[in-house]
Structures are given as structure tokens and as C-alpha cells.
Image (cartoon, helix red, strand yellow):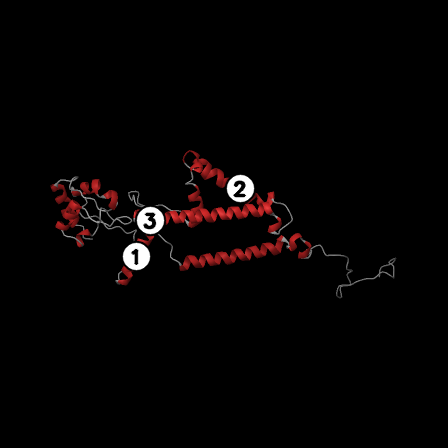
Amino acid sequence: MASGQSSKEKVLYVGDSRVKKSGRMENIPPDFTSYPGKSEAFVPYFLLKEWMVGVVVLVGFLAWVVVETPPLGYPADPTNASFIPMPDWYFLFLYQFLKYPYVSQDYLLLGILGVPGVMFGALVLAPFLDTGKERRFYRRPIASGLMILSLAAVVYLTYTSWDGYQKQLVATNTTPEHHVRAEKVKEALEAGKPRPNPLKTVPIIEESDPAMEIAQSNCMSCHAIDLAGSGNTPPLLGIGNKYTKEEIAAIITEGAGDGMMPSFKDTLSAEEIDELSVWLAKQTQ
């Protein structure tokens, strides 16, 4: 004991180190119950738990991507008028939001930059704007109310967008491209054929034939520039394997598919129809 120290003072030792215990050590945070709402220290406890949750979500998402085949469509085709564009699911709410009049057309800049900028800016600034120590959501009515309102709006807009898309498919009798592609893959595998590759194009036979100009003016707006078809429109490549020259001429003249293929008897002359049908009958690849 040091000289001059009172002998009646009670001395507490930690183990055998003979170090006097005087209050709480600086590197040990207070007990969690010392915080309002019985929360915990942000560093390292809360941050570690958030990091672990993020890891679990990321691993689950990666497993989902590996197991579930992504719904890929066909290569972009500007001539496909039946294609209905749709964003990824996490942007459906914003896609639906931009359909409303006061955030589109003359107010498009407000819709694509103004409102989303305020929303995401508020999310980034939330830790600096909401500096209260209370962590129980029912004692934070403003912050909790805004969060619940935002989540409800996102859910509603997402559902409305998807429901409208489904109704649009029914109204236009359109099958999504990734469904068509998946069905073709299934048919090919069941028939013992290799998986079809939509990126692989088949060359057009006798592309320098004068009938090609007739096809460019009358057929490619629906059957695509490479005649490979698009959406529900069948390809013209390989049509010679399915139909004879006479059958092709009859389809061009009278139309087919309950109006899906229009009649060209008033648009093309008999000579042009005959020339085009002869050329299409050669497309056997």
C-alpha cells in the first residue's frame, strides 16, 4: 500500500493483477438497458446484426438467381409493334407513378427527377433529420407514419402496375416474349433437339432477289427485318418447310389467323404476290 493512504480504505482487486477497481472501464459500453427504448449500441452490436442480415439476404438472392432462370426476351426489335415494355419488378411502382397526369407529359421532369429525388434524398438524410433517442416505433408517430405511408404507396403502385399489365396482355392477345421463348425451349428439349438460341440468326436465301424489296415494304414491319418474327408474329425464315408456294400465295392473298395476317389482295398485284410467294417458298432454313 502506498505511503500516506488511509488503512481504513476498502481496496478492491481484479484477479491477481492488484489493480484497483475504480468505476467502469472506458472501453466497455453501458448495458443495453441504459439506452432509451432498451436498444443497443450502434457500434459494434447493431451494425454487426445489420451486416449479418444483409449477408443472409444477399446469399438468398444469389441462390434465387442461380435456381430460377431469368425471364429473358428476344433481342430488341424496334419493328415489333406488339411488344409491351415493362421494367423490373422493383421499378414497377415508379413506372405506374409516371402514368399519372401531374408527373408526366408537361410535368415529366417533376416525375422523373423531382419527386423521386425528394423521396430518396429524405431517405439518405433521415439519420440527420431524425435525431431523437426514442427507438420504439409507436412513440415516433411522424417517422413511423411516413414510413408506413411510403410502403403502402409502393405496394399499391406495384400491384396496380402489374394488374394493368396483365389486363393489357389479355386485351391485345399478347403472350410475353419470355413465355414464348420458354415454350420453344421446352418443345425443343422434349423433341431431343438442342436449345434454340434467339441470338443466332438464319441467313435469308437469295437476299438480292427483287422480291426482297416487296417483303421489305409489306412484311418486315411485322415479321422483323431479319424475317425472324417477333412476339406472336411467326418467322418467315423456314416457311418453305411448312407451306408450298401455292399455300403461301393463298395466305398472302386472303390473310390468315383471324385477321392477324392481313390480306394483301388489294395492296399487291397478282404478279407481285406470285413473285413474293416463290421467293418465300425458297426460305427453307
Quadrant (top left/top right/bottom left/bottom right) for the N terminus: bottom right
Residue 218 drawn above or below residue 65: above
Q: Residues within 10 Å of mark 3 (few under 14, many from 20)?
A: some
In this view of the protein, which residue sits in the foreground, 114 or 174?
174
Q: Residues within 10 Å of mark 1 (few under 14, many from 20)?
A: few
Residue 121 is labelled as 2
Q: CA distance from mark 1 to mark 2?
A: 44 Å
Mark whose residue sits in front, 3 or 2:
3
Residue 19 is labelled as none
In this view of the protein, which residue sits in the foreground, 84 or 276?
84
Look at 14% across and 50% down and name the residue there: 247
Look at 52% across and 46% down and name the residue there: 149
Q: Amino acid at mark 3?
A: Leu
Q: Quadrant of residue 69?
A: bottom left
Instruction: Please report whichever mark, 1 or 2, sits nearer to the chain's N-terminal start.
Output: 2
Instruction: Please report whichever mark, 3 or 2, sits nearer to the chain's N-terminal start.
Output: 2
Residue 183 is labelled as 1
- Residue under label 3: 169
Most extreme residue toward the top is 106
Q: Amino acid at mark 2?
A: Gly
Look at 51% across and 46% down and name the residue there: 150
In this view of the protein, which residue sits in the foreground, 283 or 170?
170
Residue 242 x, y percent position in the rendering: 18, 54
Judged from the image, the secondary structure of the residue bearing numbered disc 3 is helix
Instruction: Please report whichever mark, 3 or 1, sits nearer to the chain's N-terminal start.
Output: 3
